[in-house]
Image: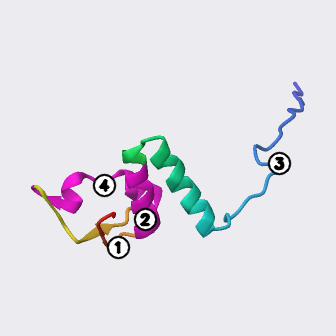
């Protein structure tokens, strides 16, 4: 038997830009911060600030726990996180928001 059926397949990224995206501009970063502050999304704002300041990948950022950056009631001024993808340590400073 000869089964020659043609299946029409359209790639999910046909006509879309692929590859590395342009980095966020400073005014875009501040626009996001202001919108999160106005919406009173404290957790999202803290995660966004940490992502921008530490340059961690998303998977590493969501795997962070409170005890990674705090010891009891005291927040560490500096933290080291092992990257999941490269297994290399990333050190970043934690500053106080004023």
The residues tagged by marks 3 and 1 sit, at their Cα atoms, a distance apart of 36 Å
The residues tagged by marks 3 and 2 sit, at their Cα atoms, a distance apart of 30 Å
CB atoms at circles 1 and 2 under 8 Å apart? Answer: yes
- Which is more N-terminal, label 4 or label 1? 4
Is label 4 in a helix, a strand or a loop?
loop
- Which is more N-terminal, label 1 or label 3? 3
The residues tagged by marks 1 and 4 sit, at their Cα atoms, a distance apart of 12 Å
Check disc 3 and report the residue beneath it. 14
Is label 3 in a helix, a strand or a loop?
loop
Horizontally, residue 18 falls left or right of residue 92, namely right
- Which is more N-terminal, label 2 or label 1? 2
Q: In terms of image quadrants, where is residue 29?
A: bottom right
Task: Name the main secondary structure of what is drawn in magenta.
Answer: helix
Q: Is residue 24 visible?
A: no
- Chain part drawn in magenta: 45-72
- Which is more N-terminal, label 2 or label 3? 3
Check disc 1 and report the residue beneath it. 90
Q: Marks 3 and 1: which is nearer the front?
A: 1
Q: Residues within 10 Å of mark 2 (few under 14, many from 20)?
A: some
Q: Position of residue 27 (x, y in %)?
A: 62, 65
Horizontally, residue 1 falls left or right of residue 27, namely right
- Which is more N-terminal, label 4 or label 2? 2
Foreground residue, 51 or 36? 36
Q: Position of residue 98 (x, y in %)?
A: 33, 64
Check disc 4 and report the residue beneath it. 64
Q: Disc number at residue 56?
A: 2
């Amino acid at each position: 038997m000869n089964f020659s059926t043609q299946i029409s397949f359209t790639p999910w990224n046909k006509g879309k830009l692929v590859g590395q995206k342009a980095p966020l501009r400073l005014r875009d970063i501040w626009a996001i911060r202001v919108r999160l502050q106005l919406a009173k999304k404290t957790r999202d704002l803290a995660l966004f600030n940490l992502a921008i300041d530490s340059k961690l990948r998303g998977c590493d950022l969501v795997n962070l726990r409170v005890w990674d950056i705090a010891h009891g009631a005291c927040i560490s001024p500096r933290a080291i996180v092992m990257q999941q993808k490269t297994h290399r340590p990333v050190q970043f400073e934690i500053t106080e928001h004023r």
